[in-house]
Amino acid sequence: MTLSEMASLLGLPVRKDGKWQLFKTSATKGIGLDEAMEGFTGTLKSRQSFNHICTSVMKNISHFFLEMC
């Protein structure tokens, strides 16, 4: 099965609620696992950075509103 066939089967092309990636892998042959894990860890790192930024922004907004009251 090709990656585009798998994406279609999973309904990924119509999803608008986030990013997705598919990696062609084979655990028994050891193919593609490094690339898939690098992609996965990169996504986690970017989400952690995003969450940290959002938390910081929310703290600043709440401090601003508390000072106004």
Image (spheres, helix red, strand yellow):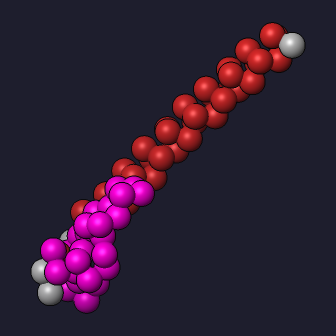
Pick the residue in front: 31 or 6: 6
Pick the residue in front: 14 or 36: 14
**Picture quarter containing residue 53?**
top right
**Picture quarter containing residue 31?**
bottom left
Residue shown at the point (86%, 13%) measured from the top left: 69
**Residue 41 in the image: above or below residue 49:** below
Residue shown at the point (24%, 75%) measured from the top left: 7
**Residue 14 in the image: above or below residue 30:** above
Residue shown at the point (75%, 24%) measured from the top left: 62
**Picture quarter containing residue 34?**
bottom left
Q: Position of residue 54 (x, y in %)?
A: 58, 34
Looking at the image, the residue that sits furthest to the left is 2
Does the stretch in magenta take in 65? no
Residue 37 seen in the current view:
no
Q: Position of residue 18 (x, y in %)?
A: 39, 56
Q: Which residues are magenta?
A: 4-30
Residue 62 seen in the current view:
yes
Q: Position of residue 63 (x, y in %)?
A: 76, 18
**Residue 22 in the image: above or below residue 59:** below
Quarter of the figure with the N terminus: bottom left
Q: Is residue 1 left or right of residue 44?
A: left
